[in-house]
Amino acid sequence: MLKKKYLTAALFSALILSACGGGEAESNQEAGSSEGKTPIEITWRGTGEEDAVLKYLENFEKDFESENSDIDLVLTPIPGGEGDYNTRLALSMQSANTAPDVISEDTFILHSDAAANYLTNLDDYVGEWEEWDQFFENVKEGVTAADGSVYGIPTVTDTRGIWYNIEVFEEAGLPADWQPQSWDEILETAQIIKDSQPDVIPFSMNVAAVNGEATSMQGFQMLFYGTGDTLYDEEQQKWNVNSQGFVDALTFIDEFMNQRELGPSLSIALNNNYTPTVIQDMLPNNQVAMVLDGNWQVRNFLEGGVAEMENVEERIGFAPMPTQNGEEPGYVTMAGGWAWSIPENSQNKEEAWRVIQAMSDYESQLQRVNSEGSLTVRKDVAEDSSYLERPLIETPTKILENAHFRPKSDLYPNVSIEIQRAVEAVSSGSMTPEEAAEQYRQGVIDIVGEENTY
Amino acid sequence: MEAARESNKRILSDNIKTAIFLTPALIILLIFFLIPMGLTILFSFTNLALTGAQAQQIEFVGFDNFVRMFNDNQLYDSILKTLIFVVSSGVIGQISLGFLIAFLMKGKNAIFRRFIGICVITAWVIPEIVAAFTWVAFLADSGTLNVIATSLGNIRPIAFLFQYPMISVVVANIWRGTAFCMLAFQTALDDISKEVEEAAYMDGASRFQNIFYITIPMVKGTIATTLMLTTLSTLGVFTLIYTMTAGGPGNATMTLPVYMYQQAFVSYQLGYGTAISLVILILGAIFGFVYTKLLKVD
Amino acid sequence: MRIGKVEKFIHHTILVVIAILFILPLLWMLFSSVDTTPIQSLKIPEQFTFQNYLGIIQNPAIIRSFAISLFLSFGQSFVVVIVAIIAAYPLSRYNATYEKPFMYTILFLTSLPMSAVIVPVFQMFLLLNFHDQLWAVALFMAGASLPYAIWLMKNFMDSVPVELEESAWIDGASVWQGIKKVIAPLMVPGIFTVFIFTFTGSWGNFLVPFILIQTPENMPASVTIYQFFGNYGLIDFGGLTAYSVLYSLPVVFLYFLAQRYMSKGFSFGGATKG
């Protein structure tokens, strides 16, 4: 009987202790806003301890708050996977009670969120903003929705290409300044590497549905836009579901993954930890020769990065992805990026706009872009010496001028899921390229309606 | 006449008394369970989406989602995968392994029983995400199972999660859920009086006859209840599968909860997603109906 | 039951093998968490370290998330147990005509996945101004686990003989006193079972707090664990496994605490007679 009492007491004290913990939090929260400052909540997809955006924002917060005593910045990263993040954000933007004031939007979902009326139309704001002229024109395109209005201020952009390990290349007798001219040349190079170093994975790219947009954009579309086809006809607003390029791109994946076994094993390729494994671990350790991925991955190899190395340009190279048969301009890249947007339901739009302006100025942009290893959206930053002297920046910047952007349609995120399913079906060997293309055709028709396809 | 009126009165008062006792439960259930459930069912008749133009103008689309389900091959495939998963991991795996452990433990030394119990139960009480991650590591190319396998024979590591995805998630789920069945059967078996079994033994019944004709019928009620609860909880398994395989590779482990999640949260088609969740509900009801009929217990 | 020595030996062997198979995947977690160089497979650490644990214990944000988890899970489980006892009593003792339909309806509704229900709940929370309120989150989780709990509890209660209670009534006890003095003590194993069942369920729940709680500081441990996972970089096995051990500890501890009361395991007594 006595013991039972102890148990109950223990359980209750745990309860009370934790209840106190809970209460304390709320009172802290209250204290912040009661000083007459306007709290501005900034939300982005948090990535834990090594979060580059968090580090950048913490610095920004210090500077900004010392100059703007009326605003209290509240940094609220949301953890979780891509789907979890977008769901949570979409839900909270539906109400004035929960909407953040500034959000970090992946440009691929910006069109959808604009169509859902989640975002504030920024036309009037940028109209009176002198610095808007400093932004690259094609980057502005990425934040302009189908209705022709601006819904976000770009903050970083990016391109994609083939990261290759120079030591592995030299071991196989391949040139250090390698530049492939066609898909076939990639496969041939991969074969040479396989023959000379059987333990090295010759070629790798994102092929898993679980890795979401990365598989669609860093992976499939880097091939697909090299065939000359396009996913979506923006003039007619119709989706292309009968494309030979679609089958060709899937065939390339089938070739290197299954037919010629030039890719990673499924345990690596279909893992949700694919990118860090390949980029941060295998590429620096000479275990993989070529990886198709984003230019921002360079940050891993620079000072303070996860796989920091000296003389990175002597060990790692970045080659543009060739078009299918070397068609003009000889290479292909997709460009994406992130933007800052103001939810329509934000209660403090004027203050939020001031915050975005401050985040978008020369100094702040330079810090952000250098800490993340991505490409700048401002012309003046692009000329800054600290930006230009970054290793491996030249090629990614150069190819930006011919970059393709993802379809400007609010249904793109859904179509993208169908692309990911098709890619994984082929890479895992459960469908032929033709079957997967047919599944894609059906899937897209279900999403957009048959009348909106061609 | 009198007696009938008496019993009518009794039923009436039972109904009222029961309702009074149920009030607190009903209030919580109504606000936090039944209303959201009702809304969920309502949503399945809409084109509700989380983003895009459809999020702006939600419309009732009648049975459109259900017509679409009818033509959705992936849905049929998911129903099949769900059945395979539920029957092999829940109905067969957890129940029989749980019964086996409980049966073997009967009459053993208390400390020994406790030791075995701890091993089995830890798998059940740890958080699902931890269990899932433990299995991802256990089955990885350089994971424990492959290290053991390669040290026994000179073979290349097997990518269990990719070559045998369904078996992998089934085994992991058996591992996780057996404890519940074991605990249920342990009690039921302990309740069987020694005399009954002794008597059967005297009559010359073999060990297996004994199990099939005496033990199992005696715990039939427990089996029925455990089957029901196990089936319903297996039907809803999401985190374990999603963490281990995310429904893949391809669609190899795309059970209904995973497919539902994909449609609702990854493709943002909330309306269609909720319609799929109703299929899960119906499957649960069918299982329940079959059990009650087959085992003739309430 | 009389069994021979050989058979007894076989029984023991099978059980030990099963126990090893069950514990094997978990050993990796334990060993890696104290290893300076953890890998993905089980290995005896060459060098022991508590650094992984210290890193977590010294992180106030993580400790805070544990406290919030405790609050949510205890709060929810207490509500569930008390309400379930009150609800199970008439279902076990009286013969209401709507008993069966009621029982089956609530039971089958639990098979709706949480992910299907969470969006309506979110919208309802906004409407009622419940969003970001930890107590409301606990109550919602209580509502979602009540059906199962009522089911279990009714089955436990069926196994408590009604005669015991009747003799208490004859001594002048009320129905409520009967529940408190006669039924509850006999139901301790059942109550613990329901408690633990409910507790473990909410302890590991990611989606509900993730959607319903706004303030990052109020996120429970089931959400903060995500900072150790995938696509954020190479998995830090040491940190992840140490976190997993700490995260599992409260439920395992709770189970051992309760085990003596559950020593009878749990009985679906009424049904056994059916």
Image (cartoon, rainbow, N blue to C red):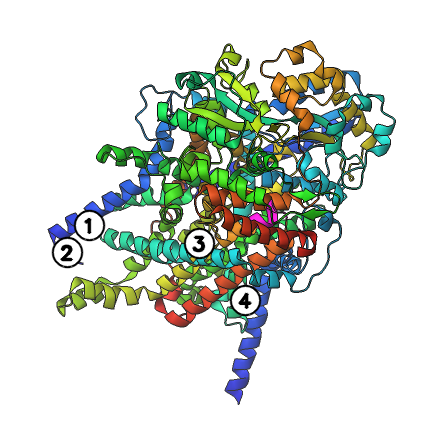
Amino acid at circle 3? Thr
Specify the segment rendered in magenta.
B262-268
* Figure check: A311 above or below C253: above
Which element carries disc 1, helix, strand or loop? helix
Please give the label number shown on residue A409: none
| Residue A178 percent across, percent down from the top left | 51, 19
Q: Chain of mark 3?
A: B
* Residue at image mark 2: C3
Tell me if I can see residue A299 in this picture. Answer: yes
Amino acid at circle 2? Ile
Which element carries disc 2, helix, strand or loop? loop
Marks 4/3: CA distance? 22 Å
Query: Which residue: 35% across, 28% down?
Result: C31
Q: Does the stretch in magenta take in B209?
A: no
The answer to whether the residue labelled 1 contacts the one labelled 3, judged by CB atoms less than 8 Å apart, is no
Which element carries disc 3, helix, strand or loop? helix
| Residue C84 percent across, percent down from the top left | 52, 56
The answer to whether the residue labelled 2 contacts the one labelled 3, judged by CB atoms less than 8 Å apart, is no
Please give the label number shown on residue B234: 3
Amino acid at circle 1? His
Q: Nearer the viewer, residue A7 or C139?
A: C139
The answer to whether the residue labelled 1 contacts the one labelled 2, judged by CB atoms less than 8 Å apart, is yes
A254 sits to left or right of B221: right
User: Do the residues marked 1 and 4 share a common chain?
Assistant: yes
Marks 1/4: CA distance? 43 Å
Which quarter of the rendered picture does the N terminus of chain A lie within?
top left
* Residue at image mark 1: C11
